[in-house]
Amino acid sequence: MTVKRLGQFTVQLSQPRIAGAFTLMGPREGEGPLGKYFDAIVDDYMWGEYQAEKAERKYLEHAARRALGRAGLTEDDVDYFIAGDLMNQITSSTFSARALGVPHVGIFAACATSTLGLGLGAMLVDGGFARRVLVATASHYQAVERQYRYPIELNVQHKLTNQRTATGGAAAVIAADGGGPRISRVTFGRVMDWGVKDVNHMGAAMAPAAMDTLLRHFQDTNTTPADYDLILTGDLARYGSKLFRELVGRAGVTLGGKHMDAGAAMYSDEQLPGAGASGSVTSAAALLGYVLKEMAQGRLRRVLALATGCLHNALTANQGDSCPGVCHAVVLENA
């Protein structure tokens, strides 16, 4: 059997490609700098639902079905549905899986769920365990904010380091015979905890994990920033991105103009977003929206995407625990 590992944290893949993808975002996200790259914008956050949790479920399921359509497939053509979200017991993913009727692999890595799902799906296809895998995630401002911080009805004054949970759903189909970019490498990261306890400063909690996964990836693959057209992180947002660049700089790595953060790029300054966006859909939408379309136009050839997640919940935070972070990475190539 051919060993596909590169170093301690990374695997090398040969077959899996993005066969189809779809990004479906809320109105505020559609008005932001990345809005033109999203496939569809919903003009009502609640999308006709009375509960934000049900609206989030609708975003996820709709994005999954549209991604299947983009790939020219139906539910019967995929072997697994890998999905996760930020609700308790990944409820949106579970109920979407019920509607789709596809064997479900539920995952959770907070806002790093997108690259965790893409990495797992790519490994299943490359290993011959699946022909095609559907991967999806979603988040919703109203639903997530009240679960991880406080109900928005309280109108609590936000700090400058606060991130706003993005609303939307994003999905992709991974297949050996897909027509899109190839997922060539996957680096799953370690859980890192540097003692940050402020749930209003998730960027600081996640930056060490992003730094660690990036450096591990470079070490395993013998690459540098020069080998990539773009290094996409998320959702570090403005303050977390600054800390991330400082940390990798201390390690002797200069990112230069190669780095972009999905959380920092989601909203404009005029939208008063605080530090930027968070939520599991943020990295997914930037990768499956912005990156895929730029790669299709030939403006990007090789992209390293590192989605980050803050692994706290309201209970652990209220009990005085710190906020662990994790970062998972995938490489997309036009090859």
Image: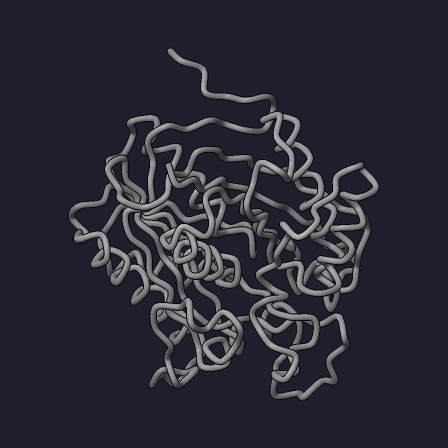
Q: In this rendering, is residue 267 above or below 84?
A: below
Q: Position of residue 86 (x, y in %)?
A: 52, 61
Q: Position of residue 65 (x, y in %)?
A: 25, 61
Residue occupying the point 44% across, 46% down: 117
Q: Position of residue 120 (x, y in %)?
A: 42, 38
Q: In this rendering, is residue 286 above or below 46?
A: above
Residue occupying the point 45% across, 60% down: 290
Total numbered labels placed on residues in the image: 0
- The residue lying toward the viewer, choosing from 91 and 333, is 333
Residue occupying the point 61% across, 30% down: 223
9 left or right of 238? left
Q: In this rendering, is residue 207 above or below 262?
A: above
* Identity of the residue furthest to the front in this view: 298
Q: In this rendering, is residue 242 above or below 103?
A: below
- The residue lying toward the viewer, choosing from 38 and 313, is 38
The quadrant the N terminus occupies is top left
The quadrant the C terminus occupies is top left
Q: Position of residue 231 (x, y in %)?
A: 59, 48
Residue 41, located in which quarter of the rendered image? Answer: bottom left
Residue occupying the point 34% across, 68% down: 39
- Coloration mode: one colour
